[in-house]
Every structure is written in C-alpha cells, then in structure tokens.
Amino acid sequence: MWSILKGEWRKIRRCQILLVGIVALALCPVVQYGSQLIINPENRDPDYNFVTLFSSVIWGNTQVFLPLSLVMTGGWMIDREHTNDTMKNLLTVPVSYPGLLGGKLIVTIWLSLMFGAYSVAVTVLTGTIAGLDGLSAAVLLRQGAQVIAAAFNTCLVCMPMILIFGQLRGAYLGGSLLTFFLGYCILFFKSGFLLSAYPFSAALILAGFDMQDYNGATQAPSILLSLAGIAAVLVLTAAVLLLSHPTSQAGKTKKKKGRKRRGRQRA
C-alpha cells in the first residue's frame, strides 16, 4: 500500500489539474474581500478584519472552491487510469481494486490538508496586502486550524462523489459541478435536522464554524447530528469501495495480453 501511495503522490505532483485547486483557493480570499469593496458603503462591515476574512474563506472553500477542486482532482486520478489504459497494469499489483481506490482517496485527503495550509497562507497574504487589522499569533493558530479542519472534513464529504464519478469515464468534471451544487445547498438549511446532519453543514460545524453568521441559522446546531452526518458519509464511502470492481474493458485487455504472451511462447 505504501508503494501505491508514493506512486500516486509522484503522479499527482506532475499533473496540471492541480492548478485548478491552486488558482481556486488563491481566488477565494480575494473574492471574499472584494465582495466588501463592491457593495454599497452603508452595507459594508466596518469591523472587517482578519478574523472575518478567515471565516469568509472557510465558508467559501467549503461551499464552492474545495468541492470543485477535490472532486475534480480525485476523480481525475481514478479516471486517468482508464483513459490512459493503465488500469490493466495496476491490476497486476498484489492489492485489491478497492485498495487501489482507497490509496487514491488517502492521497486526496493529504492534498486537502495541503490545500488547507495553502489557503491559510494566501489568506494571510491577501489580508496583509489589504491592510486588515487583527492578525496575531493566537488568531493565526485558531483560524488556521479551523481552515485546515474544514478542508479535511470537506474532503471526507466529497469521497463518495470522487469514487462514483471517477469510475465513470470522463464524468469527474460533471461530478465536480454536482458537488459544487450540493455544497451551495448549505445556504438553504437554516434549522431542523438538515442544519446539522447535512454533510457539508456538518463539515463546517465539526470544524467549529459559526453557521448563524453565514447562512442565517435560526437555531444552534447539534454536534451529535453532525457526527452522524459525517459517519453516514463514511459508511457510504466504504460501501462504494467494497462494491467497486474493475471495468470489463480492463479485464479484457488483461486477458488479451495474457493470450499474446502464450502465443509468443508457442512460437
């Protein structure tokens, strides 16, 4: 398994699709701060500071930028094996097919943590250039940890979509758009069961994010329901992993390769 993880990490470091996440997460703090500049002066937050910017970035990352980036990148990691016809080579490795997919998910989780740390750095840079107040070691540690925790939780929520759309050839782009829509829906759950149990809301709540300031929640969320929502996602991910199997085309290619070898040996 460790060799699979190292191989996947080497491959993803060379892929250009990483630029999608890098650019998207760099744009998030710029967009969030820029929204303050384009609205009417009477509607602006006069106390907008680093804490506010960090909170806006966490909201934007979880709602839009991370679902797009993680599903697109993770789905591409699976899809490329079919597109480049390299799945038949991976199937010769003494690891089960669900184990291969699990390795790709682990690399995606690593990537989400790196995206979170990168987002913290870009947010600090954006706030410094904008001349915002309120940056201190305590704020950086607390808000930075919250950004990374939200990125990790969001990755957990996205894993079923990565597995499903990554195994459908060329569907990972559509899957990333669908996941973006699902992330955007957290705006509409302001009370009741879905406020806490909806997976994207749960990702924010378990990271310590205050939902009432951003989606207008009318009641306090439940930590237990949020844990149940994330647990349901993990169960779904495990079920999809266990039910996953190589495509028939990869199996046929593998059989043809074996026949060719036997034919050459006879000759």
Image: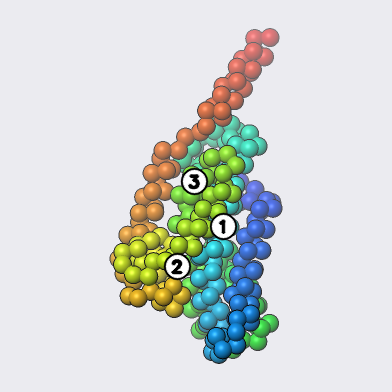
* Residue at (43% x, 43% y) in the render: 241
- Viewer-side label of 2, 3: 2
Give the mark, 2 or 3, whose residue is nearer the N terminus: 3
User: Residue tagged by mark 2?
Assistant: 187
The answer to whether mark 2 and mark 3 are in CB contact below 8 A is no
Decide if residue 17 is in sight here.
Answer: yes
Vertical placement of residue 170 versus 55, above or below: above
Give the mark, 3 or 1, whose residue is nearer the N terminus: 1
Nearest the eye: 60 or 246: 60
Give the mark, 2 or 1, whose residue is nearer the N terminus: 1
**x and y percentages locating residue 41 in the rendered image:** 60, 88
- Viewer-side label of 2, 1: 2
Disc 2 to disc 1, C-alpha distance: 17 Å
**x and y percentages locating residue 219 in the rendered image:** 32, 75
User: Residue tagged by mark 3?
Assistant: 163
> The residue tagged with tag 2: helix, strand or loop?
helix
- Viewer-side label of 3, 1: 1
* Residue at (63% x, 18% y) in the render: 261
- Which corner quadrant of the image does residue 68 belong to? bottom right
Disc 3 to disc 1, C-alpha distance: 14 Å
> The residue tagged with tag 1: helix, strand or loop?
helix
User: Residue tagged by mark 1?
Assistant: 68
Q: 10 Å neighbourhood of mark 3: few (<14), some, or many (≥20)?
A: many
Amino acid type for the residue under numbered disc 3: Leu
> The residue tagged with tag 3: helix, strand or loop?
helix
Vertical placement of residue 8 versus 185, above or below: above
**x and y percentages locating residue 12 in the rendered image:** 63, 51
Q: Is residue 170 left or right of residue 220?
A: right
Amino acid type for the residue under numbered disc 2: Leu
